[in-house]
Image (tube, rainbow, N blue to C red):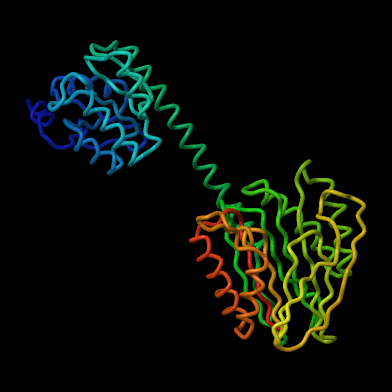
Amino acid sequence: MAAQTLLLNPAIQSVKPVPDADRDCVLVADDQPDIRYALSLLLRSAGYDVHTADGPDAVVTAVADKHADLVLMDLNYTRCTTTGGEGLNLIGRIRALDSTLPILAMTAWGTVDLAVDAMRRGAADFVQKPWSTQRLLEKVRSLLDLRRLARKARIEEEVEVGEAVAIQRKLLSFDAPDSRDCEISGMSRALRFVGGDYCKVDRIADRRVAISIADVAGKGVPGAMLASSLRAAQKPLLGRQPADLCAAVNAAMAEVTPEGKFISFFYGVLDFATRTLTYSNAGHNPPLLVRPDGQVQALEAGGAVLGYFADWKYEESQVALQPGDRLVLFTDGILEAENAAHGEFGAERLADFARQSRHLSASEMQRALLGMVSAHCDGSFQDDATLVVIAVL
């Protein structure tokens, strides 16, 4: 009698007062107390914890409170006894809360069309009343096994994603060495959780700083893997001249870059003792050197993209630096940011805005330029986007 009183409560009820945390929990949803009671006994005897609910709202509450590893639910409730409409709507409500929770739909008025509709809306499987005990338990066990495997895979994926993000952060380092000669400010936005943009600032001597920026033709994990390989190939070569470094890195990347992929790359050395910038551009968007008087020079000298022509010989060039210069480096995602009319931000607009904001500090100029690009595309970038500003002091 006590059990019957418990099952007649309108709220969510628990058959076992203290569920075992190691057991899977099945949420049984039906408007008939006898059905809930029978299914609870069956599932409990099979080793499952059981919660019950007598209507859609109670089911939604239970799912929201994480009281289910599987939902075994009727499709017909008191307001809709034969068509399954209320149950079909409930499937959508459950899916909105948990897209991976297995749902085993059940109805005495089942038809093939109703079963198809239930599964189209998110049910994992379908049974009819009266049920076969063995068949129902097989379905429950199978769905819970699949959920367990999916949960394990999701946890492993989350760990991998976390590690990938940590690696990506190291590949996008805008921290400038302490210097009385320059100020550096940068940012990067990955279209996915990781991306193919790469930027590093390295001190290579007392008053010499190397700046590298690259854009891998590819997004997500594949792009990030190539960016990691680029860093591994470049770091031991930081002492070389830009053209030699590009040639050596290109040869190394040609061995690991998949067919059809490539990397655009810019490498420059700022020597503040001699007030010069020596650089080589391997097919990258030409950085902009903005002079205090408003003149803008595109840094183009170099050669082909990395990873495509293994024996390419690169050129380098040198420009004089002066106080007040602003060096603006960026990747495709900045220029290709589109507005609602599919108009790109473009190199000309970036050069104009860089000229107009040249009086700002590096951090102020970087934020201003990024704000202009973001406003142009309404914050919806179509590619990984990196922007760096170096102010010569």
Seen in the picture, residue 31 relative to 269 is either above or below; the reply is above
Q: State the residue at coordinates (60%, 74%).
A: 366
Q: Position of residue 295 (x, y in %)?
A: 73, 81
Q: Position of residue 368 (x, y in %)?
A: 55, 75
Q: Position of residue 355 (x, y in %)?
A: 65, 79
Q: State the residue at coordinates (53%, 70%).
A: 371
Question: Which residue is at the front of the view, 64 or 188?
Answer: 188
Q: State the residue at coordinates (6%, 25%).
A: 1
Name the side, left or right, on which 144 lies relative to 309. Answer: left
Question: Which residue is at the front of the view, 359 or 163?
Answer: 359
Question: Which residue is at the front of the view, 24 or 110?
Answer: 110
Residue 303, by quadrant, is: bottom right
Seen in the picture, residue 364 relative to 242 is either above or below; the reply is below
Q: State the residue at coordinates (60%, 59%).
A: 344
Q: Position of residue 318 (x, y in %)?
A: 86, 76
Residue 250, by quadrant, is: bottom right
Q: How many marks?
A: 0
Question: Which residue is at the front of the view, 273 or 83?
Answer: 83
Name the side, left or right, on which 186 lies relative to 296. Answer: left
Residue 276, by quadrant, is: bottom right
Image quadrant where one finds the C terminus: bottom right
